[in-house]
């Protein structure tokens, strides 16, 4: 951020020459005080007219208007948002249902009052370094508290409910009781799914304990609209021998936090965390007691439509949905095969079915570690990682493909596809290519005889 910092100071100097004042605002100030790295830098310019600021920016580079009616600008080549103070008034229930009026002369307190939380309402004079704190943000930052700034303006943006929970998860903070109480009364139904997904993604990919996000939403009584499948896990019982942690909610929260330790190994950390969240949705509809013992037979299969319904509230991305469904379906198998010391052929088939074999192993590990059991078993990780190495080595060997079969005299058609499937099974079994080709041709003769 060094070039952005230098540019911000240069802008602040020119603003001061015209009688104005420039401040760092929002997350940049918060993260700087917390000692956290940030990739976004926001500044706010007070005391000069918009035309004056535009002239200053034009002297420094190519000005970009991110939203002129909102008083927000940028300079080409810089990750630096330059805004003017503004007044906002909600006219509807949606996240974007606001009328905005740019007012460079409203003062720092009025400008900061429109922000969501006290820790985000902090301002820092760019030239002097002085922190401007009108609402006790420094104390809340020190105490680890998420607290809303204003009782009137805060409820105008219902996305702030999710933001409160998301910040609590990312920073390991608590949410002030008065903020929780206010969030309980806010209506989330009119928010667009992509905005919910944005906050969810930050919560489960940027926090060490993503469970905090859902625990806070539960406390706020805000799971019903967007997270009903997660809420349905509350009070769903589990066999205490294998799940002494309690209900499926507790297990899922523990799995989420374990998955956060492993997500960097997955093909896509966000998709992987969604799989961890949804992996046991099926238990809510298939848990039953038989002969005094709790079972959740086929919960992985029955959870797939629940996981898909959940995801489709936020996204239409088919690859994401396919990834999660595949992981939910297979999440029990790695540990089952490991405990049974299954043959290489079985683990090869499993990894071949998986869209992300490394991620599947991590999900299985998180599932096992995210519980309390009176019958602990040795870790399945060494077995699974050894078998993954074998699978990848098998997949790197020469194998029989369509061209090989055509060159051997077979004709295109439905039977060729069946023979290719057979060739793939031989590949998974580790059969050497020439031997596999002979077996495929023999299999072709058998099919022709039929």
Image (cartoon, grey):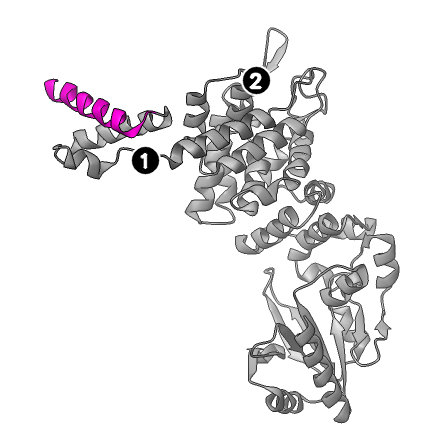
Q: Give the quadrant of the N terminus.
A: bottom right
Label 2 to label 1: alpha-carbon separation = 31 Å
Q: Main secondary structure of the magenta part?
A: helix
Q: Is-magenta flag for residue 159?
A: no
Q: Is residue 310 visible?
A: yes
Contact (Cβ within 8 Å) of mark 2 with mark 1: no
The residue indicated by pointer 1 is: 398
Q: Position of residue 218 (x, y in %)?
A: 70, 40
* Residue drawn at (86%, 75%) of the image: 130
Q: Is residue 186 visible?
A: no
- In the rendered structure, the answer to whether residue 268 lies left or right of residue 13 reads left
State whether residue 104 is above or below residue 413: below
Name the residue nearer the viewer: 408 or 297. 408
The residue sitting at 61% across, 15% down in the picture is 294
Q: Position of residue 172 (x, y in %)?
A: 77, 48
Q: Secondary structure at mark 2?
A: helix
Q: Nearer the viewer, mark 2 or mark 1?
A: 1
Residue 443 belongs to magenta span:
yes
In front of the other: 408 or 359:
408
* Picture coordinates of residue 98, whole percent (x, y): 62, 69
Query: Which element carries disc 1, helix, strand or loop?
Result: loop
Which residue is rendered at x = 75% and y = 59% of the image? 36
Q: Label 2: which residue?
A: 339
How busy is the neighbourhood of tag 2: few (under 14 within 10 Å), some, or many (20 plus)? some
Q: Earlier in the sequence, mark 2 or mark 1?
A: 2
């Amino acid at each position: 951020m060094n070039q952005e910092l230098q540019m911000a100071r240069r802008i602040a100097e020119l603003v001061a020459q015209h009688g104005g004042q420039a401040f760092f605002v929002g997350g940049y100030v918060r993260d700087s005080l917390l000692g956290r790295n940030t990739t976004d830098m926001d500044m706010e310019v007070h005391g000069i007219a918009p035309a004056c600021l535009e002239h200053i920016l034009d002297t420094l580079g190519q000005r970009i208007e991110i939203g002129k009616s909102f008083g927000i600008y940028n300079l080409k080549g810089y990750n630096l948002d330059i805004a003017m103070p503004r007044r906002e008034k909600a006219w509807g229930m949606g996240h974007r249902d606001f009328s905005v009026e740019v007012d460079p002369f409203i003062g720092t307190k009025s400008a900061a009052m429109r922000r969501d939380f006290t820790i985000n309402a902090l301002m820092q004079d760019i030239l002097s370094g002085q922190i401007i704190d009108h609402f006790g943000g420094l104390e809340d930052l020190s105490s680890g508290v998420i607290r809303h700034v204003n009782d009137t303006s805060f409820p105008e943006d219902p996305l702030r409910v999710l933001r409160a929970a998301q910040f609590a998860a990312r920073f390991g903070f608590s949410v002030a009781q008065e903020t929780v109480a206010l969030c309980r009364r806010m209506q989330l139904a009119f928010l667009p799914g992509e905005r919910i997904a944005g906050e969810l993604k930050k919560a489960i990919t940027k926090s060490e304990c993503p469970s905090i996000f859902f625990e806070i939403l539960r406390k706020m009584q805000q799971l019903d609209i967007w997270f009903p499948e997660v809420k349905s896990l509350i009070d769903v019982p589990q066999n205490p021998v294998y799940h002494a942690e309690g209900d499926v909610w507790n297990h899922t929260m523990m799995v989420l936090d374990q998955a956060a330790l492993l997500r960097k190994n997955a093909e896509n950390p966000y998709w992987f965390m969604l799989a961890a969240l949804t992996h046991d949705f099926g238990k809510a509809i298939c848990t039953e007691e038989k002969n005094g013992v709790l079972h959740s037979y086929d919960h992985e299969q029955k959870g797939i439509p629940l996981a898909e319904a959940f995801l489709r509230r936020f996204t239409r991305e088919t690859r994401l949905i396919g990834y999660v469904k595949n992981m939910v379906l297979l999440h029990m198998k790695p540990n089952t095969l490991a405990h049974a010391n299954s043959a290489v052929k079985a683990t090869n088939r499993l990894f071949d079915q998986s869209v992300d074999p490394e991620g599947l192993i991590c999900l299985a590990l998180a599932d096992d570690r995210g519980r309390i059991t009176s019958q602990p078993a040795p870790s399945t990780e060494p077995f699974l990682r050894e078998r993954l190495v074998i699978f990848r080595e098998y997949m790197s060997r020469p194998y029989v493909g369509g061209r090989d079969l055509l060159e051997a005299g077979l004709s295109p058609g439905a039977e060729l596809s069946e023979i290719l499937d057979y060739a793939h099974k031989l590949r998974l079994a580790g059969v050497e290519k020439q031997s596999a080709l002979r077996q495929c041709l023999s299999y072709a003769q058998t099919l022709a005889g039929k």
